[in-house]
Image: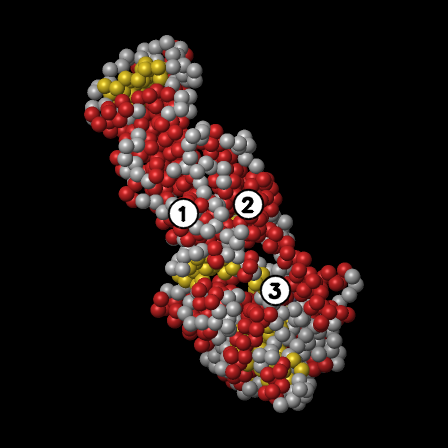
Amino acid sequence: MEIPKQYDPKQAELHHYERWEKAGYFAPEINQDPNAPVFTIVIPPPNVTGSLHMGHALQHTLMDVMTRHKRMSGFRTLWLPGMDHAGISTQLMVTRALKKEGKTRHDLGREKFVERVWQWKAESGGQITVQMRREGASVDWSREKFTMDEDLSRAVREVFVRLYEEGMIYRGNRIVNWCPQDQTVLSDLEVDKLPQAGKLYYLQYPVKGSDRRLTVATTRPETMLGDTAVAVNPNDERFKDLLGATLLLPLTEREIPVIADEFVDPEFGTGAVKVTPAHDPNDYEMGVRHNLAQVVVIDQHARMTAEAGERFAALDRYKAREQVLEEFDQLGLLEKVVDYEFSISKCERCKTVIEPLISTQWFMNMEQLRDLALELMAKGKKPQFVPEVPYERVYTNWLENLRDWTISRQLWWGHQIPAWYTTDGQVFVARTEEEARAKAGTSELTQDQDVLDTWFSSALWPFSTLGWPNETEDLKTFYPSSVLVTARDIIFLWVSRMMMMGAKFMGGEAFHDVFITGTILDSQGQRMSKTKVNGVDPLDVFDKFGVDATRLTLAQVGSTDTRWNEKQVESYRNFANKIWNAARFCMLNSEEAAVNPELIASSESAQLHDRWIISRLNQTALEVNAALATYQFHEAVQTLYHFFWDDFCDWYIELSKADVTAEQASEQRTEARSRLLSVLEQALRLLHPFMPYITEELWQRLPGVGQSSLHPAYQSAEPTIMLAAYPAGSQQLVDENAEAEMQAIIDLISRVRNIRSEMNIKPGERIKVIVGAPDARLRRVYSVAADQISRLVRAAEFVVGETLDAPRASARAVLTGGAELAVPLEGLIDFEQERQRLRREQEKLQTEATKLEAQLQNPSFVERAPADRVAEVRNRIADIAQRNSQLQQTLENLQ
Ligand SMILES: [Zn+2]
């Protein structure tokens, strides 16, 4: 059997993926069972702007583990890949690239600019698909989608038209978040509210017909030019006599009323607030309630308008602020300025301060959609969030407070709004221009220049990707998806909207479960980000440690926030090497042997260690399947790791070595070799969803695997581990007697090994081991395994009796089941030297114990220290006492 000494991950990663993909193993059609259960995941589409980061690698690993596990378990699986056009981010990127050529998008014009973006998408998007292939992601590339594909765009128009016809989408003149830099409206979710150390300015407005002044406090003095009222709380005694009074608005010719509104917080500032309906969302609402005029004094470029007055017009908003303050000061109307911390809204992408502006936009009323989603949760707990706490509450809270969604964006890259205007301004919403012409009765139409918010098309992703609005086979088969895997920061932007749209257009839930992943932090516990340059590039980690080791590390993260720790990846790289070496040993000793499932299908007539490994194998399979069914990825990884490393490598291979490496060919040797190979083969299958490359690389070399190893649903496929049946585990083959007996032997061997190292017995030295076991069954277990035990502890003599009959100068240990063991030391070690060493250890322990006891004597420690810390000290003292008595025993034995 040819097998390289060293595992080379790159070698394995190079060719398997291509073969799997070409053979069509990722497509659901590979499954030939007409009654196969279905498993679907739609990928959270990465932005076409980016390259993959650790967050993607984490999500993709978890999705691939689930998909591969279900595929091997006989499910008809579809993991559908795709990308998002990411409207504003992509437009920004291409705009920046143009800037380097000294051009703006207006130089190109809309059509050429959009062409340019498509070009750029072809390059950048291609990179992501290469990276995903490297990850081993078993997505069905034949169904890859892009949110701007023609069929997905058709779904977008269909939804828009239907919601418009139902009155849920409307065009209105409302106050919105405006980014003066990007020149577009933004939804509340695209705006960052950040704390800002600023000033609070107290401005005095003269009361008409009196020498009184009313003081208002504001963080934005320049907006006073657009004030149309001052409001006070109706219950505020201080201002009772001013209600209905008229104020002379300084720096302008205008007069404004004092109004009463419940919304005013008497505690803020002076209790009187200026009202600027055109430039503040709360004032806007108040303006609507009191029918106030909207005086627009700031424009879309954040410059003052003509309405602000001649001397302010065209000034930048901050310049205007300075000038307003200067003039107030000169007029003696600036009462005071105080330091003030408040939250400021900035554009999430370009960080420009948002200007609230009144603007004509398209909105979506969310009431009906919200109720549909809340009902799904209330009635059937759909979707099931994992972890449920806190995400279910986060989700429902947000839905309960949902406001209308601003869906239009002043961009060129995206789905252009399917609304057409006649020359006299009538609007016709239609699926196509043709339909609009028919409705309007004219061909003199202009399409709305705006595009839809990127998240509009993302909201349709679970069904638009399967062919909706057509009733396709895919839609019937694969909708709703089984589980959505995503990060917590897009529960609002994306998860909730998919649920609402799914409920509206498909009925029911878009996916059964939502698994929220943890965040991978840098080694200092900070979020990884491009700007901080603390990110770790998954491709670098793949290069350094291999994809499989990285995947195992990521799978462990699951839903917990985790600091990135390269040591962890390194230890899984070592695990991969361990797997390789173990498999290599099995294959180098495989002459005349082959994988034979029957050898592990029952454990009758087998030796104890065989019955034991069959039991462990089945127990492991049961546990891993149970862990994956409940998204406990960490548990699944730990279970597999310990099974393979401890049970299989450290014990089973060692215990079967004598039979497997016997020089003479025999039936017994062939059976031992075949059984070893068969256990290995099952272990590789168990590991495959996590470590696809090394498992395939090894599996292909195993003698005896082939078409018959495949799951019945894949009988026509070429042999590959990815279509082999995932071991389900059988409760019948879990053998508690075998596990208990084997545990007794493992315990005995471990104790003797401990003694060897504790007493500094040279590795080459053959020892005598004496065991006293009052229990007859245990004596039989030890006696049957005597050869194996002797080999593993390098004993020249192994004696088992009812009672322990050992010389005084022996190292002793107590075993499970009331047995005892002794290793006579005479002639093995220098007694005097050993006694000195033991006394030194005793002294050290005594010093530590004295210190700890003093701590416990100190009442303030016992009262103030956390309870678990106190318990820890008590436990340590008890441990020391026990160790001390052991040392004392050993010392006495050495007299
Ligand atoms: Zn911006």
Q: Quadrant of residue 678?
A: top left
Q: Amino acid at mark 3?
A: His
Q: Amino acid at mark 1?
A: Tyr
Q: Amino acid at mark 2?
A: His
Distance of label 2 from label 1 (alpha carbons): 19 Å
User: x%, y% of residue 590?
Assistant: 44, 30
User: x%, y% of residue 75?
Assistant: 42, 55
**Is 348 above or below relative to 848?**
below
Q: Which mark is residue 726?
A: 1
> Which residue is labeled 3 in the image?
85
> Which residue is labeled 2 in the image?
16
Q: Nearer the viewer, mark 3 or mark 1?
A: 1
Residue drawn 78% across and 61% down?
101
Residue drawn 40% across and 47% down?
726
Tell which circle, 3 or 1, labels the residue nearer the N-terminal end.
3
Q: Is residue 558 left or right of residue 348?
A: left
Q: Nearer the viewer, mark 3 or mark 2?
A: 2
Farthest residue, direction right: 102
Distance of label 3 from label 1 (alpha carbons): 37 Å
